[in-house]
């Protein structure tokens, strides 16, 4: 039974490959690629796509007495609002970048600056209506009371998936 099913599946696939597209060179490679594109889910295909993800950011706490805090925890989340899985590709173990800007716009902290990351490539799949969340700690040592500091976070390799929040040390 399993063998018949496999043979039937192959026959259907090859029949689909037999129909050439108009305006494209008629080769078996092109026919196979066209057919595979209709069978393989987008989340499993190779290559970068612009993800349909909704980034958000929060801090605990957002306003704080500077004398009482050495660091502030920030949370960066990415929600897939579509009905299709979104595939994210990363060149190494780093997924997130966080930076802090002073009121004058000067960068005073870069999260990855003193870290090393394994060179392993990775793929993260965000399922429909689900989210991924990353946490980082931001030091307050270069902040002054009364200033408004901007914390920016984003996914590495996806500049369109970024968010920011403001911290207000008192």
Image (cartoon, rainbow, N blue to C red):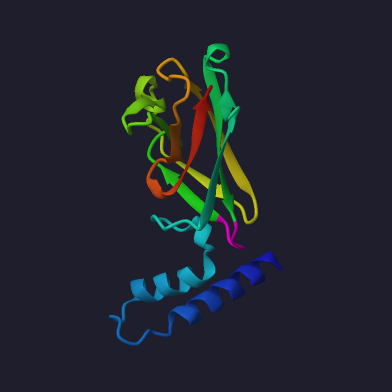
| Residue 163 placement (x, y as % from top left) | 48, 44
Q: How many marks?
A: 0
**Where does residue 58 sit, x and y in percent of width and height?**
58, 37
Q: Residue at x 53, y 69 (%)?
A: 39
Give the quarter of the figure containing the N terminus. bottom right
Q: Quadrant of residue 30?
A: bottom left
State whether residue 24 is above or below residue 73: below
Q: In the image, 57: left or right of 1?
A: left
Q: Is residue 170 above or below residue 153?
A: above
Task: Residue at the far front: name it.
Answer: 146
In this view, the residue in front, 165 or 153, is 165
- Residue 7 falls in image quadrant: bottom right
In the shown orientation, is residue 42 left or right of residue 105?
right
**Most common secondary structure along the magenta stretch:** loop
Residue at the (37%, 28%) spot, across then down:
102
- Residue 78, given in percent of the width and then of the height, sits at 55, 46
Q: Nearer the viewer, residue 42 or 83?
A: 83
Direction left: furthest residue: 25
Q: Is residue 26 visible?
A: yes
Front residue of 20/15: it is 20
Residue 111 lies in what quarter of the image? top left
Q: In this view, which residue lies farthest toward the top? A: 67
**Residue shown at 59% from the left, 50% from the top:** 79
Residue 22: give x, y in percent of width and height: 34, 87
Residue 20 to residue 60: above or below: below
Residue 94 visible from this viewpoint: no
- The span shown in magenta is 81-85
Q: Residue at x 37, y 45 (%)?
A: 157
Judge whether residue 25 is colored magenta. Answer: no
Of 64 and 26, which appears nearest the observer? 64
Residue farthest along the right direction in this orientation: 1
């Amino acid at each position: 039974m399993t063998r018949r099913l496999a043979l039937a599946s192959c026959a259907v696939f090859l029949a689909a490959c037999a129909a050439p597209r108009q305006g494209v060179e008629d080769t078996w490679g092109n026919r196979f690629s066209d057919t595979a594109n209709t069978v393989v889910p987008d989340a499993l295909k190779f290559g970068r796509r612009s993800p349909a993800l909704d980034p958000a950011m929060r801090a605990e706490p957002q306003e704080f007495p500077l004398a009482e805090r050495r660091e502030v925890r920030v949370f960066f989340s990415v929600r897939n609002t579509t009905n299709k899985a979104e595939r994210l590709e990363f060149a190494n173990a780093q997924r997130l970048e966080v930076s802090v800007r002073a009121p004058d716009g000067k960068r005073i902290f870069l999260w990855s600056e003193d870290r090393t990351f394994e060179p392993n490539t990775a793929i993260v799949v965000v399922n429909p209506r689900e989210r991924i969340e990353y946490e980082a700690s931001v030091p307050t040592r270069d902040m002054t009371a009364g200033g408004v500091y901007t914390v920016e976070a984003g996914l590495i390799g996806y500049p369109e998936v970024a968010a920011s929040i403001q911290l207000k040390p008192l």
